[in-house]
Image (cartoon, rainbow, N blue to C red):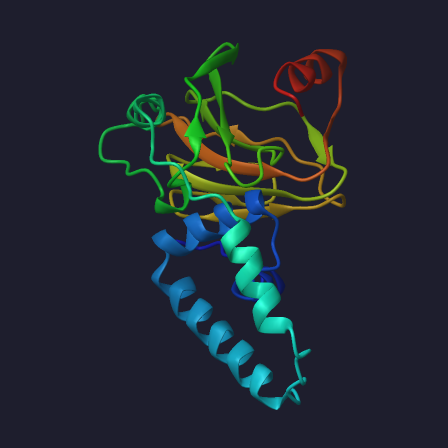
Amino acid sequence: MIRHHPEDALMLAHAAGQLPAGPAIVVASHIEQCPHCRQRQQAFEALGGALLETIEPAIPQPDALARTLAAIDAQATPPRPTTAAVAVRAGRPPLPPGVRWPQALHGCAVAPWRWVGPGMHWSRVTVPHDPDSNLFLLRMAAGRKLPVHSHSELEMTQVLYGSFHDGRQHYGAGDFDGADDTVHHQPVVSGDGICVCLASVQGNLLPAGRIARAIGRLVGL
């Protein structure tokens, strides 16, 4: 049962297309797994449509259509996927049996698993239209834990498989966690198996301890 969901403000921003690429993908991945949040998303989208209807329409400039068509013509035709691009998709790192890749990651390049510590592997996710997004997968073995840390801005996590707790709550498959600069926590994987999460970090993680900071630099956090 999914118990943890994005807050209303995040859902509304997502429905309005106002989230940066990384957070938007994490929220979309949650919505894929959560029937309750699919209903919430539909409600927020309907609310946004109703608000648009209350806005007095603006009169466009006389050359607005011509400029729009010219801008469209100036754009290069999107290239067809190359063999290399297809290979990148086909070569995604393995997930536990039965776990599907989120549709929200369609078109993203997912790097192979990279060892970052005993029982811990990390994979960079590159978003084509925003390659600077700090989006990644994290796979941790049972009982493993991340260093105690906080955040300069916002960290979003979607649990794809397994579960963890961080001293505040327990998060299982399908759950979403949002942690801002007021949260100091230490995620610990439950003892019954591995945990795989999709996460986005805006700003930086603020780990406590020299080793933790070294790991953060290793993975670009």
Q: Residue at x 41, y 17 (%)?
A: 112
Q: Is 111 situated above or below 202?
A: above
Q: For this view, does 135 lie left or right of residue 94?
A: right
Q: Quadrant of the C terminus?
A: top right
Q: Is residue 129 above or below residue 189?
A: below
Task: Determine the residue located farthest toward the left in the rendered image.
Answer: 98
**Looking at the image, which residue is at 28% across and 25% down?**
90
Whether residue 148 can be seen here: yes
Q: Please name whichever residue, 60 or 9, is drawn nearer the observer in this view of the structure.
A: 60
Instruction: Judge from the rendering whether residue 195 lies leftward or rightward of residue 21; answer left or right.
Output: left
Q: Quadrant of residue 147?
A: top right
User: Residue 117 location in percent, x, y?
Assistant: 54, 11
**Residue 107 image point, x, y percent:** 40, 38
Above or below: residue 31 compared with residue 100: below
Disc tally is 0
Q: Quadrant of residue 153?
A: top right
- Residue at horizontal 36 percent and vertical 26 percent from the top: 85
Q: Is residue 102 left or right of residue 179?
A: left
* Front one among 101 and 83: 83
In depth, the one of 164 and 81 nearer the eye is: 81
Rendered residue at 59%/83% (across/down)? 51
Q: Is residue 1 visible?
A: no
Q: x%, y% of residue 188?
A: 53, 29
**Depth check: 175 or 132 in front?**
132
Image location (x, y in percent) of residue 218: 64, 14
